[in-house]
Image (cartoon, coloured by chain):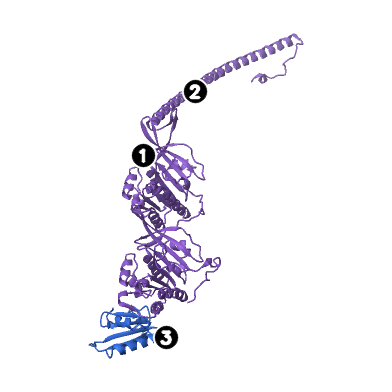
Chain colours: A blue, B purple
Amino acid sequence: MEPNFEGQVLRLYIAGQTPRSIKAFANLKKICETHLTGKYRVEVIDLIQSPQLAAGDQILAVPTLVRRLPEPVRKIIGDLSNTDRVLVGLDIRPAS
Amino acid sequence: MAIPGIHGHHSRIVARLPKSPTGIDGFDQITQGGLPVGRPTLVCGGAGCGKTLFALSFLVHGATRFDEPGVYMSFEESTDELAQNVASLGFDLPGLIEKKKIVLDHVRIERSEIEETGDYDLEGLFIRLGFAIDSIGARRVVLDTLESLFSGLANESIIRAELRRLFRWLKDRGVTAVITGERGDGTLTRQGLEEYVSDAVILLDHRVTEQVSTRRLRIVKYRGSAHGTNEYPFLIDEEGIAVLPVTSIGLTHAAPSERISTGVARLDTMLGGRGYFRGSTILVSGTAGAGKSSVSAHFVDAACRRGERCLAFEFEESPQQVVRNMRSIGIDLQPWVDRGLLEFQAARPSVHGLEMHLSRMHRAIERFRPRVVVLDPVSSLISVATQGDVQATLTRLVDYLKMQGITALLTSLTHGRTELEQTDVEISSIVDTWLLLVTLESSGERNRGLYVLKSRGMGHSNQIREFLLTDHGVELVDVYAGPSGVVTGSARLTQEAEERAAALAHEQELERRERALARLRAAFDAEVASLRARFEADQADLATGIDEQRSGATRLRDDRRAIAERRRADAAQSGNGRRQGDESD
């Protein structure tokens, strides 16, 4: 990615194409399109295929959405079905 | 990987459950082989109880000694912290990681940076663990401390469901796992992990009583395997963790009939002429300064002379002090120390709890492999425990020593005011030979006496011997029974002098009589000789006379015959045919 990209750099960790993974991805897509138009990058990592990547981002739960940029690193675990909490987790909406 | 062995429904069948050795001294003995192969074991205890060290020892020993690589998943300490903590024990974690014998994975859960929304599972953890296991072909896994999940994640019902799945998953993978858990209030673990582990649960405990710390280990559960339910003391020192397996030893030890010298010739004589039994336990008790240490030093010296290794535990004196003191009675122990035959282990009783002392002694014995062990004095252990505890501890130690066929000599200090035949530590029932050193007071003197109070399995002297400490060691001399009891010290010397004088007088009288007899015999012989001389002289005279008379008579007869012939007489012819020589002698 370009060095002075100012949007959100996101990673979604899943473990295979489970209904929960698919649901999480769908929820993420909807949130990003609604709230982060154009200012985000999403990388989906399937740990079944790349198990060696789990340790690097300290992944335990799946699905886990990791906001790698901007700092600080944030993690949102679960199927992202609660949009409000996702927005709070991504610092898009302040916690109330 | 399949799970070896049979599932634990029929406890009798699974008595030969395959075990995975931990390499922890003593633990593999009390569990008859270690942890159940291919199953998870829960190791729980409070903070600082040694859980992490136990788990890490299991893993490192697996990698270095049993060719079983392992995965260490730490939920608390970082990889660097762990490596530093165990480097002092000689565990080279970075080296083992380098050689792909061990994988360390630090699982960090920072609740503040985690938001939870919706449904999830812990498949990420499974994948991480599975990846680590596969990367080195691990056979062992440690999860330390899994309970951190509860503080890192909010959804407890998910965690519990996933834990249940995790334990099943570990079994399916066939890895031998150690899961640590923090002890809870009234429960084995704070989060009830024991609920998920059905195979083996081990509880570690660290308590401090009267400023003395003691570590104990208990096997709460071990499905399909016989195990002691006692608490076993264990220790953590520079060599790692060690469990003392001597709580429940039966009376199954062999009873050798070999005899070994006490190092004091006359004491050997008192003990049926041949000394102690090999592998027996000897108690030497007495008041302060009665010579207990000297008796034990003689024994040690004799053992070293036979080329046997001796281990001496000193609770009151430093090794240098012991060596110096024994030199003063002519026993030089230093050469044995120099040659590696004799080792001293000196420690003040108060530095450890009793269990720790026992553990340390046990460990030292395991390492040094002595044939003779000395504890000097066991009575000082009372200062760190109650009498009952000391007795129990010593019983365990003695049983252990007997199992190993090690001859043990314990000394015990009795106080002047207590009964002579009563040791502070009531250990008489566990000893085979009991020597009592007493102080005999008479004629304004205190002198030492020794007697054999008991000695199982051998005839022994029932006499008191006076016990002298000379510059060439212990000497036992006969005591004299006088009108007011035994006579020792200068009274004995007086008695001895008198007896010597009497003996001398007796001897002189004998000599005098012998001389008189000799004189008598000489006089008799002279008399006999002179008689014989006179007899011979007289005999010669008489014989000459007889001859003369006989020849005179013959001549007379001849003359008469001649006259008669001349006169034509017919005189009697008597003696006519006889020759002259017939009459001679």
Q: Say whether residue B152 is left or right of residue B461.
A: left
**Residue B482 visible, this angle:** yes
**For this rendering, which residue is in front, A27 or A41?**
A27
Judge if badges 3 and 2 mark residues of a common chain.
no
Q: Which residue is mark 3?
A: A19
Q: Is residue B20 above or below residue B467?
A: below
Measure the alpha-carbon separation of dots 3 and 2.
132 Å
Q: Position of residue B411 (x, y in %)?
A: 40, 46
Element on which disc 3 rests: helix
Instruction: Name the secondary structure under disc 1.
Output: strand
**Residue with the most extreme bottom position:** A38
Residue placed under numbered mark 1 in the picture: B470
Question: Callout 3: 10 Å neighbours few (<14), some, many (20+)?
Answer: few
Give the structural element (helix, strand or loop) at label 2: helix
Chain of the residue on which disc 1 is drawn: B
Residue B400 horizontal/vertical position (percent): 45, 54
Foreground of the two, B4 or B178 = B178
Viewer-nearest of labels 3 and 2? 3
Whether tag 2 and tag 1 are in contact, CB under 8 A, the answer is: no
Whichever of callouts 2 and 1 sits on the residue coming sooner in the sequence is 1
